[in-house]
Amino acid sequence: MIKYALIFALSIGTFSASAQLVDEDHQLLWEISGNGLKKKSFLYGNYHTNDRRVFNLADSVYFALNMADGISLEIDAFSDFDDDYHWDTRYGNIRFKYDKNGVPYTNSNSSTETRYGDEDGMPQFLDAWFHQYCLNAGKEFFPLETIEFQESIGSSRSYSSPDYWRWARSLISREDLMNIYLKGDIYELDKFMRSSMGGGNGFYKELITDRNRGMATVMDSLLQEENRSLFTAVGAGHLASSTGLINLLRNKGYTLRKVMATYSDDVSIDKLEVKSKRSYLYENDSIGVQIEFPGKPTEVLNEDGWEDYEFRLIYRELGQGNNYIVEFYERNDESTFDELADTYIASPSESPYEKVRLTNGGEAYQGLSDAYPEGLYWTRVVLGEDYILVLKAYGGNKFMNSKRAMRFFDRVNLN
């Protein structure tokens, strides 16, 4: 049942009214209490997609996010970036054409599809957006499963196999499934999942039932470990039924109460707080560099010596398939800046790189590169006193046709 209510407030002699929508039937957010907990925690059913409609989060979800000391998700999707671009989520290859002045442009303005949607959706898929907020806000993060475990599920439908991702992508694009999710009906969603996975056994058992038991055990441990409030988000298909997380946690002694979805005309303080955590400032005083990323980057050290760089920073917007990388190379020879640019920018012959003046008064070389494994990507080379910085950014058609790579490059400040 959806109700509209008027919330009245008196403030310094003035009378104001704010309309609030309350959806009593929405079942995605659950409060966890009891069983010795000193703080309330929350369980939320999400959708593994970057479709903008699933980001219309209720005010109650922003409240739960803002008050939580830590956030728990199915996996740490940002932990696997040192795996030879394993998490490049784009489908298809980007191809460029060049105008008479050598300026490149993609041969299509269509939205590139990804594992989690396409470029018309949000930069992150919903799980990764929760994770990005968690790290930007300085909260603790806890994965319920390892990536290795998820990749081992099913002998024929591994999470890394093309067959699985074609099947998963077909579910993401199913409008009937989306409508069930947007209604917040987790019990109807469970029926849909059972039907699409061939009943209660087989793939449903491997992907849902068996994993629910493992995730409930980890959640129980996290909730009991310390005096913390935890916001846990898992696929909404894991919540309902007798073997769902709600019932499993109740069996462990917890009290789970459905939290109604509320939507106010006025932006809540909690929503403002969550939305304010839009970026992450990376600082390295020993090098003298500051870089503003959309979220906290993963630092990958060159420990085995296979690469030339000292270390790299990687941040990926998995929903749209955008990639931001900064590589640090130690200056240990007498190469000129021109020679270094020729080394680090693999420009196509149709579009040679160029020297540009930076906003801080310095100079850099930048242009389009075409090299394995990234494919086509924008590159800028900046020369510091002790380090060479190679900045890379790439994504789908719309990203490569935009100025987003250059805007990221301009947020790299080298003292």
Image (cartoon, helix red, strand yellow):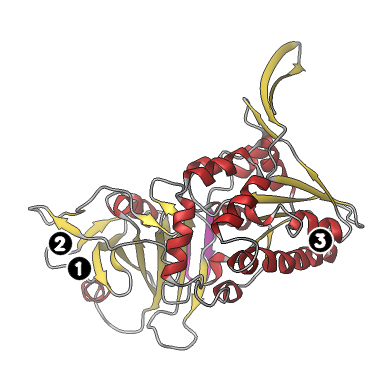
Q: Position of residue 160 (x, y in %)?
A: 47, 72
Q: Using the rendered view, name the quadrant where residue 114 is placed.
A: bottom left
Q: Using the rendered view, name the quadrant where residue 275 is placed.
A: top right
Question: Callout 3: 10 Å neighbours few (<14), some, many (20+)?
Answer: many
Q: Position of residue 168 (x, y in %)?
A: 48, 60
Of 325 and 401, which appears nearest the observer?
Answer: 401
Q: Are marks 2 and 1 in contact (CB under 8 Å)?
A: yes
Amino acid type indicated by mark 2: Ser
First of labels 3, 1 by sequence position: 3
Mark count: 3
Residue that carries the numbered disc 2 in the rendered image: 351
Residue that carries the numbered disc 3 in the rendered image: 223
Instruction: Examine the rendering and report whether any part of residue 216 can be seen.
Output: yes
Residue under the image location 39 percent in, 54 percent down? 408
Q: CA distance from mark 3 to mark 1?
A: 52 Å
> Is 139 on the left or on the right of 408, as rendered?
right
The answer to whether 236 is drawn above or below residue 352 in the figure is above
Instruction: Examine the rendering and report whether any part of residue 291 can be seen.
Output: no
Q: Which mark is residue 347?
A: 1
Residue 290 lies in magenta, yes or no?
yes
Question: Callout 2: 10 Å neighbours few (<14), some, many (20+)?
Answer: some
Part of the protein shown in magenta: 280-291
Q: CA distance from mark 2 to mark 1?
A: 6 Å
User: Which quadrant is home to the C terminus?
Assistant: bottom left
Amino acid type indicated by mark 3: Leu
